[in-house]
Image (tube, rainbow, N blue to C red):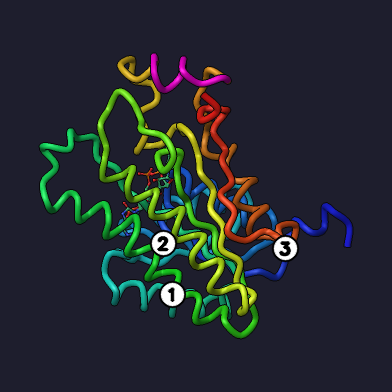
């Protein structure tokens, strides 16, 4: 197999949670461009449909399913719908996540719970639900971590998010170790600042510490992170498991 062929996802079936906008949409499109059949999920049916239509206008096929993955029943239904539509699942991108900017003294219980229910619990439950379908033949799980697992972002405070992403990185390594016998690889991509609805990178109050503190002096756009997800999902990363791939324009070198 040539090195470029090892990046091909032809014949693979992928599920991207939170795939209707931002990073998840770019990951879904990247996986489809690399040859995979792709299902996206999100809570908002209209946004799901818009992402499918936008991809179609560029000649890419995406399928969508409505799911709130903080609910176990929705995870089961999303997984079943993906298996039925695509005929199985070889790749899971655990992308859906939430972040609140809040001083720790003021974080209400329901906000803390929302962050951990989505960023950690749902990621674990999706991994297990989909992992059951990968057990027989193997597969690749790509978790979306963050530089927030390694550094404390400034100037905004977001302790719950930072702790949740540290949990994602450690869960990645734990499942990689435990599921290697099933030929299920588990890796994470750890992005720096990327322009999406979650990260208001253009707001002036963030410029000094989000942009000027970074060696490249810029933020990324979502498509710049997609290649890393395609790599980890593909046979090019066959010897790669438990890896945290940091894609941050150099932010964490300081
Ligand atoms: P966005 O807020 O732009 O998108 C979040 C996505 O998650 C949407 O598709 C949303 O769809 C979906 N989602 C939210 N809640 C749920 C839920 N309960 N069930 C199912 N889907 C849900 O975020 P980004 O694209 O910026 O972030 C994507 C991932 O990348 C996150 O894990 C984030 O932590 C991580 N990340 C982002 C960085 C950045 O700078 N942007 C940097 C580092 C990491 P819907 O609303 O329809 O449910």
Residue 125 visible at all: yes
The crowding category of the residue bearing disc 3, from other C-alpha atoms within 10 Å (few below 14, some 14 to 19, many at least 20), is some
Is 211 contained in the magenta span? yes
Tag 3–tag 2 contact (CB < 8 Å): no
Q: Quadrant of residue 239?
A: bottom right
Q: Do residues under tags 1 and 3 come within 8 Å of each other at their CB atoms? A: no
Residue that mark 1 sits on:
128
Q: Is mark 2 within 8 Å of ligand 1?
A: yes
Decide which of 190, 1 is in the foreground and name it. 190
Q: Position of residue 160 (x, y in %)?
A: 26, 45
Q: Position of residue 12 (x, y in %)?
A: 66, 69
Identity of the residue drawn at 82% across and 52% down: 4
Residue 244 forms part of the magenta stretch: no
Give the label, 3 or 2, closer to the camera: 3
Please tell me which of labels 2 and 1 falls first in the chain: 2
Q: Residue at x 41, y 36 (%)?
A: 196
The residue indicated by pointer 3 is 238
Q: Which of the two discs, 1 and 3, labels the residue nearer the N terminus?
A: 1
Quadrant where the N terminus lies?
bottom right
| SS for dot 2 | strand
Tell me: 232 left or right of 147.
Answer: right
The alpha-carbon separation of the residues under discs 1 and 3 comes to 21 Å
In space, the residues marked 3 and 2 are separated at their CA atoms by 26 Å
Q: Quadrant of residue 207?
A: top left
């Amino acid at each position: 197999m040539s090195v470029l062929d090892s990046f091909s996802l032809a014949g693979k079936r992928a599920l991207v949670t939170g795939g209707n906008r931002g990073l998840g949409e770019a990951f879904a499109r990247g996986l489809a461009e690399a040859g995979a059949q792709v299902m996206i999920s999100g809570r908002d049916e209209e946004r799901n449909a818009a992402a499918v239509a936008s991809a179609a206008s560029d000649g890419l096929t995406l399928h969508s399913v409505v799911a709130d993955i903080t609910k176990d029943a929705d995870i089961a239904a999303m997984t079943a719908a993906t298996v039925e539509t695509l005929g199985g699942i070889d790749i899971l991108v655990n992308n859906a996540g939430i972040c609140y900017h809040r001083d720790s003294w003021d974080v209400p219980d329901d906000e803390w719970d929302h962050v951990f229910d989505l960023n950690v619990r749902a990621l674990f439950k999706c991994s297990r639900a989909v992992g059951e379908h990968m057990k027989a033949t193997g597969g690749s799980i790509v978790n979306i971590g963050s530089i927030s697992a390694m550094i404390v972002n400034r100037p905004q405070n977001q302790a719950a998010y930072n702790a949740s992403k540290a949990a994602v990185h450690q869960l990645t390594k734990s499942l990689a170790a435990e599921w290697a016998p099933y030929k299920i690889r588990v890796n994470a991509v750890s992005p720096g600042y990327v322009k999406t609805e979650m990260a208001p990178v253009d707001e002036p109050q963030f410029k000094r510490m989000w942009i000027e503190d970074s060696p490249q002096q810029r933020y990324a756009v979502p498509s710049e992170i997609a290649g890393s997800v395609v790599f980890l999902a593909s046979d090019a990363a066959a010897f790669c498991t438990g890896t945290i791939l940091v894609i941050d324009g150099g932010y964490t070198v300081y």
